[in-house]
Image: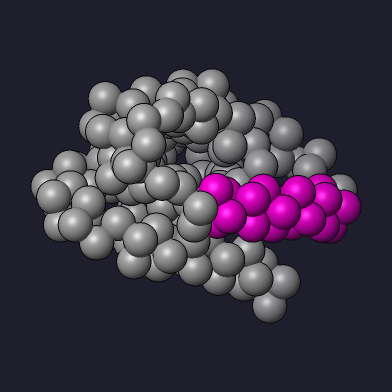
Amino acid sequence: MNIASFLLYCCIVTFTPGPTNIVILSTVHNFGTKKAMKYTYGATIAFGLLLVFSAVLSTTLITIIPRILVVMQIIGSFYMFYLAYQIYKMDTSKPAVNQTATFMTGFLMQFLNPKVIIFTLTIIPTFIMPYYNTIPAVTISVMVITLVGFLAFATWVLFGTIFKEFLQRHQKTVNVIMALFLVYAAVMIWM
């Protein structure tokens, strides 16, 4: 296995903007670091579970991937449009309790996030299984990939925390841009 290729792929996919990263940035911007970290913990655990599922079911899923991908694309796209709308209409001048920035929503979003689903369905069969098929090797691989994912999510929390004042000063513009990124991500699923 080409370790450099493997790590590069992991980093590019997890650190680039996607639904989870955009929601994390928006959560830091509107509700603070603490709420964003709760969301991040849920997203990380679900990310790890998806990797485990991929490792366990990779041979079975190969035969049914087209059906799974179509369903996940539809559900994921609509969910991203919903999140884009929620971010666009968000108004932090009114105090509100954010129900979208919880551990559970971070956890559940990963199962509807096409970027994560496609990544977890491809990383194990493409980079791990051809070279390592023992339980310890696959387990270590899943742990490393999960750690990379957590570091990516935490980087977005850090970015949001560092630039929070700037983001709050330009709240409406930031919300529109983040909403547009989500709409773009939803549309690109079908391209």
- The residue lying at 40 percent from left, 67 percent from top is 177
- The residue lying at 82 percent from left, 50 percent from top is 71
- The residue lying at 13 percent from left, 50 percent from top is 165
Residues 44 and 61: in front is 44
**What's the magenta region?**
65-86
Look at the picture and state if 19 lies above or below 109.
Answer: below
Q: Is residue 5 found inside the magenta-colored segment of the image?
A: no
Residues 1 and 183: in front is 183
Q: Quick check: can you spot residue 121?
A: no
- The residue lying at 51 percent from left, 39 percent from top is 132
Q: Quadrant of the N terminus?
A: bottom left
Residue 37 lies left or right of residue 69; in this view the side is: left
Among all residues in the image, which is located at the extreme bottom?
191
User: Residue 15 location, x and y as percent?
Assistant: 34, 54
Residue 175 lies left or right of residue 62; in this view the side is: left
User: Residue 89 location, x and y as percent?
Assistant: 51, 53
Q: Quadrant of the C terminus?
A: bottom right
* Chief SS of the magenta region: helix
Q: Is residue 79 found inside the magenta-colored segment of the image?
A: yes
Look at the picture and state if 118 lies above or below 124.
Answer: below
